[in-house]
Amino acid sequence: MPKLENIDAPSVLGITEQQLNLLKTVYKLTSKNKTATPREIEHTYRADHNTQIQTSNLFRQLKTLLDKQFLTRENEADYRLNIEGIKKTLDTRKQEYHTKLEHYEQLTNQLEEYFKKATETKGQPVVEYLTDKELFFNVSQSLKKADKYYTTSKFPGVAYTYTLYTKIGRGEYSQILQQRCFEKKDIEVWYLTPLDLDYPFTHSMAFYRDKEKALKECEIIITQLENLAETYDNLHIFHLENPYGLDVMLPEGKDLIDSYLFLRDEHMNATGGIYMKSPEIAKRAKETFFSLCSNALEVRGEQGKIIYNKLRGHLKRLGK
């Protein structure tokens, strides 16, 4: 058993080093019977780590830790460590680890068969059906190595709150995408979307089962999308009113090989997907994606304000 101080806690918990340091800062303050306000957290963090954390980034990280239930908050400005929430996350991640361990064992036992099949399909596209959970898990792994990411979406999930996206089974996907795009800023993300507000509203209603809370959630999502699009140059959102006829996710690294296609039910909810490993198919999908983007409006600047005002107008109509 490793020494406690040698445990790679960020990896085990599924958070960043900065987020772990914030948890330590909150614990340090509360253990000394101090109130862990954002001001105190910022001051203590700077003193302990000899580095400044931007206020906007601090609040965003605290919000993420609240959504993950790693922190609790009282009176809007009194943060505390949520030990039970952290244990619950560890239990979930431990179950996921055991699933991966089964994959390791299966590959070890069938390694020759695996390579035999790979040889038989050489030069041919690899096509595989994926469940919704498998689809977003595989895309999450691809995103870890990608430099660019092109995706169509009914509404950009990058603007969803962590809690809501976790409830629909895409928490890890959301975390990796946001970390790469907004914290590390080492990936370009391109969305092609009709900005169908009914989509996050339906998700919110299914989660909250309360119309007022669902409307409030959508209001947060619209504001977050606006702030992100205006703040980050590596996030490109293109709005296309008419159906784009293409449901695709394309992670591009050194090479463009993998493409993922959504499968949807009659309510247009994603039920799974198809994975295709083929440079030629991925290349054609990317060309089609940018051909559609050329007929779309980028959601930024004055053009973006008009679109966001329309979204807020639609939200009011949903509230009636």
Image (cartoon, rainbow, N blue to C red):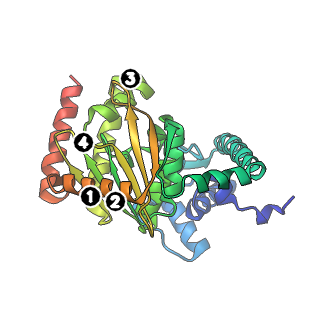
**Callout 3: SS:** loop
Residue 9, image x and y in percent? 69, 59
Query: Mark 3 = which residue?
Result: 210
**Callout 4: SS:** loop
Query: Mark 1 = which residue?
Result: 287
Sequence-first tag of 1 and 4: 4
Q: Say the numbered circle drawn on residue 9.
A: none
Amino acid type, callout 3? Asp
Task: Identify which residue is drawn at 20% across, 31% down.
Answer: 316
Q: CA distance from mark 1 to mark 3?
A: 42 Å
Sequence-first tag of 2 and 4: 4
Task: Identify which residue is drawn at 29% across, 55% down.
Answer: 227
Amino acid type, callout 2? Lys
Residue 116, image x and y in percent? 66, 53
Q: Quadrant of the N terminus?
A: bottom right
Q: CA distance from mark 2 to mark 4?
A: 25 Å
Amino acid type, callout 1? Glu
C-beta proximity under 8 Å, tags 2 and 1: yes
Query: Mark 2 = which residue?
Result: 283
